[in-house]
DNA sequence: GCCAGAAAGCGAAACGATTCGCGCAAAACC
DNA sequence: GGTTTTGCGCGAATCGTTTCGCTTTCTGGC
């Protein structure tokens, strides 16, 4: 590999002139010419390790998230990556698989590997642990989708409670009064918020809450599938079901159809995520649509601002979900 | 941030002793004690930039792929990341969104950022371009799922043709002789191979090929959904459909169910990917199941071996797909 | 108690860039 | 034409490690 020294020798100028050229400084035309030729001849590329050491930055951003197989995460990460890349950053992505030990380890791993900033979808870590790992480094962090209670810093969330409130209200306005909800684990912030929106909608419309109609389990196909069996087995089954996650929705629909349950006549379903798939169904399945791309972009921009020196107070954005069809 | 120098001063030993301690060399017990205390007191962590510069490695692996929202890719990447991490490597993931310019740019980006190795799911790049970007660096590369014609190096593929052959044969053995296929774009290697398996199965069983029954388009929900409409609109519709991608499968099923087409009585479907979802349906939807985790692990291990100094000839593995249910 | 060999510690030289301050030459001004 | 201003180029220091070769200190066998 050619070094800056080789280029300098070949072009007949000093090392510092090469560096200046590489970083956009003023260099005399005849030198520019010579430098260009030398670089081409030697196929020179600046050594990123040396540069990183000198400037103490890597232009890499850690992205830590629980899972990558769900389309929601995939889309958020793609938007993040794209926005960051446009600013010359690259993403060091790390997936912890909803596993507490791994979440901690991977966070440590990212931090000890010289990231300039962190985008984090947290799950089980505590505030103290987070600060312990993170404090000595002092890199900007943006939390996405969920927050660690007590941690300050920028955050990008969606308005879960409000979105679910509206969706469930819509079901109520259609005449339903036995509405079930199948949701994720109660330990996760988003599931809690979504459940909250459901309860608020019921109570605001004077409907008594029936805990037989609340199913909370993993965010997975099986939860929706089995949930359908459970709900249909009740003495007084619900006429509508709200699901808070795409996999759950698909599981529910699959089970319902296998049993000849007509949607929406026998069971009205309001889903979550994957608007493009759900709106293609006939009739379209109404869903809460999270703004994945906007989430990613907002988080990336927050981070880019901080990395650019912005030092204002922590910001929290709650992006609005859309109901689809409108 | 504390440096190794600070630790040395505080512990009363030389810099090289600290380095030796950090890298597992022999150090006298009383010094170990002092060093430990100094490290704890100063919260010292080795600066990754300096280390990278010195050893000219980053222990990071570039992963370049077209998409991350499909569960297939997500699962492969998670397996890759896990295996690599266990060996102390981390993943620099880059998604190019099936966009030619981006594919090239992102490859360059990874390469100029000091990756030690590359895992690559290629799409449109040519052999020459690949070598031009890659040659001067000389890092090991593993191609996954598809290969660039002409590029040598380790590769991990699946046995697409054979898997589809078996699946379609199964449909034929059940008595079907009008079997459609809905597949991805013909420009992509995997789609070509899968189509090849389909044709071979037909011809081996003496069934005449009818090009009305072949639909090739994007790997997307809409392709399956519209494909269903197209196929049902034929004068002589197929009695079975083979789909070569999960999104296509789901689109097809959705459209079929909306039309009251019974599966498998009216239309027998054989799908691809997402075995856990499809086998939960009742009756289970038969699918070709790609070994995503094994793909990721094999690719990671190939790379780890190369990085460990192994220098044998290029290896290509074709992993076998499973039909599920068996 | 001596000496050889092993173990542990030390200083200094890298790794390859960026950057600072200084000097020289060309341009600009009157 | 002399003097100030500006523009470029240069050398040297620096970033924080690892590593090499050498010296010092231990250890153990006689």
Image (tube, coloured by chain):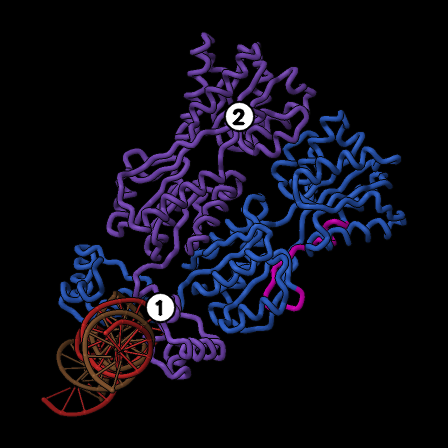
Chain colours: A blue, B purple, C brown, D red
Callout 1–callout 2 Cβ contact below 8 Å? no
Tell us which disc is closer to us: 1 or 2.
Answer: 1
> CA separation, marks 1 and 2?
51 Å
- Residue B126 seen anywhere in this rendered image of the structure: yes
Q: Nearer the viewer, residue B188 or A133?
A: A133
Chain of the residue under label 2: B
Work out which quarter of the rendered image holds the N terminus of chain B and state it.
bottom left
- Location of residue B326 (image quadrant): top right
Q: Pointer 1: what residue?
A: B25
Secondary structure found at label 2: strand
Q: Which residues are magenta?
A: A149-165
Task: Relative to B45, say whether A278 is above or below.
Answer: above
Answer whether residue A211 is magenta in the image. Answer: no
Q: Where is residue B264? Give x, y as percent.
A: 64, 18
Mark 1 or mark 2: which comes first in sequence?
A: 1
Identified at 35% across, 42% down, the residue is: B142
Identified at 84% across, 47% down, the residue is: A211
Q: Where is residue A64? Give x, y as percent.
A: 53, 56
- In the displayed structure image, the side of residue B121 where residue B258 appears, left or right: right
Q: Nearer the viewer, residue B113 or A225?
A: A225
Secondary structure found at label 1: loop
Q: Pointer 2: what residue?
A: B323
Q: Residues within 10 Å of mark 2 (few under 14, many from 20)?
A: many
Answer whether residue A155 is magenta in the image. Answer: yes
Chain of the residue under label 1: B
Q: Where is residue A243? Give x, y as percent.
A: 72, 42
- Location of residue B262 (image quadrant): top right
């Amino acid at each position: 590999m050619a070094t800056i020294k080789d280029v300098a020798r070949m072009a007949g100028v000093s090392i510092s002139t090469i560096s200046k050229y590489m970083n956009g400084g003023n260099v005399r035309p005849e030198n520019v010419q010579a430098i260009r030729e030398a670089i081409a001849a030697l196929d020179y590329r600046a050594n990123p390790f040396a540069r990183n050491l000198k400037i103490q930055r890597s232009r890499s951003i850690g992205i830590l998230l629980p899972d990558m197989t769900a389309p929601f995460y995939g889309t958020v990460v793609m938007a993040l990556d794209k926005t960051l890349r446009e600013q010359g950053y690259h993403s060091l992505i790390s997936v912890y698989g909803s596993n507490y030990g791994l979440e901690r380890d991977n966070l440590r791993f990212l931090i000890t590997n010289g990231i300039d900033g962190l985008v984090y979808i947290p799950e089980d870590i505590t505030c103290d642990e987070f600060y312990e790992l993170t404090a000595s480094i002092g890199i900007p962090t943006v939390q996405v989708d969920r927050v660690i209670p007590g941690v300050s810093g920028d955050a990008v969330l969606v308005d879960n409670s409000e979105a679910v409130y509206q969706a469930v209200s819509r079901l109520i306005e259609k005449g339903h009064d036995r509405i079930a909800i199948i949701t994720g684990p109660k330990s996760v912030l988003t599931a809690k918020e979504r459940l909250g929106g459901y309860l608020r909608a019921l109570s605001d419309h004077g409907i008594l809450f029936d805990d037989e109609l609340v199913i909370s389990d993993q965010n997975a196909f099986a939860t929706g599938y089995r949930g359908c069996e459970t709900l249909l087995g009740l003495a007084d089954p619900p006429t509508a079901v709200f699901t808070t996650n795409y996999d759950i929705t698909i599981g529910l629909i699959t089970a319902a159809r296998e049993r000849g349950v007509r949607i929406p006549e026998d069971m009205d379903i309001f889903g979550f995520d994957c608007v493009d798939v759900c709106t293609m169904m006939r009739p379209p399945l109404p869903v809460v649509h999270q703004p994945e791309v906007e989430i990613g972009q907002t988080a990336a921009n927050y981070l880019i601002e901080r990395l650019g020196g912005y030092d204002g107070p922590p910001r929290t954005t709650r992006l609005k979900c859309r109901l689809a069809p409108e």
